[in-house]
Amino acid sequence: MPTTLARPDTKDMKVIAVIPARLASTRLPRKMLREIAGEALLARVYAGVKACARLDQVVIATDSDEILAFCQKHGFPAQMTSSNCRSGTERVYEIATNSPADVYLNIQGDEPLTRPQHIDSLIAVMQDPEVQVGTLMTPAMEIDIANPNAVKVVVDSSGRALYFSRATIPHDRDGIRPQYFKHLGFYGYRKPALDRFVALPESRLERSERLEQLRFLENGIPIFVGETPFDTIGVDTEEDLRRVKAILLG
């Protein structure tokens, strides 16, 4: 499994982190600008990403004039992307077409518990030039094992993802109690992988689970998964907001 510790030889790899941020979320409207413990969700994500010293650039990618104005007010670098983008990956691709880099990171804008260790671990996965797509997982807490809003992942012995699902995988048929891993909303891509993604149609499994990373797997593009001990809570519901607030206020 790819290590979570970065090697010194990654210092020359140019890495751009993109935070896709749209205002028209369906399950929790306007969530990017919702306040958690006195600070907007998007601001918390940006601060967590920016704290990683190994990034060459951080940019918020949005299709919202209101989010763009919010970023400008707070001094966050932001770029407008097409309202036709159907996923965060497509927004990252749009940024990548105009900003050359070795690796592009997709840090989902609804991850307010993002910390620089997440970014370091993801960069470590991408240090292997053969890895085209990388992501992160963490041991699943009991509350998340059966939670469809917490995506689970199963990997093989080399750290490649076998499948991602909102269901509880692997299934515990005989009461063995397997180790469950929760997928975290952090991705790394090389440009050829982004080119391939946007050229492919939405896949059957992607449509069923509403998980864009399944487009890669269903088309034979491996995703390597690094492990981190630092959990996050992707904010999709009011309950998620309450859980994050409780953690932040300790």
Image (cartoon, grey):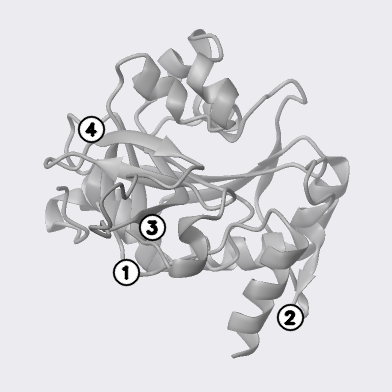
Q: With respect to residue 13, does 8 lie above or below?
A: below
Quick check: can you spot residue 13? no
| Residue denoted by label 2 | 37
Asked whether disc 2 touches disc 1, contact meaning CB atoms under 8 Å apart, the reply is no
Image point (42%, 42%), residue name = 187
Residues packed near mark 1 inside 10 Å, few (<14), some (14 to 19) or many (20 plus): few
Left or right position of 179 against 201: left
Asked whether disc 2 touches disc 4, contact meaning CB atoms under 8 Å apart, the reply is no
Residue 97, percent from left and from top: 52, 22
Residues packed near mark 3 inside 10 Å, few (<14), some (14 to 19) or many (20 plus): many
Indicate which disc, 1 or 3, sits on the residue closer to the N terminus: 3
Inspect the image, locate mark 2, and give the three-letter code of the amino acid beneath it.
Ala
Estimate the spatial distance between the alpha carbons at disc 1 and disc 4, rounded to whole Å.
22 Å
Disc 2 secondary structure class: loop
Inspect the image, locate mark 4, and give the three-letter code of the amino acid beneath it.
Val
| Residue denoted by label 3 | 119
Using the image, tell me which numbered label, if any, was put on residue 131: 4
| Residue denoted by label 1 | 229
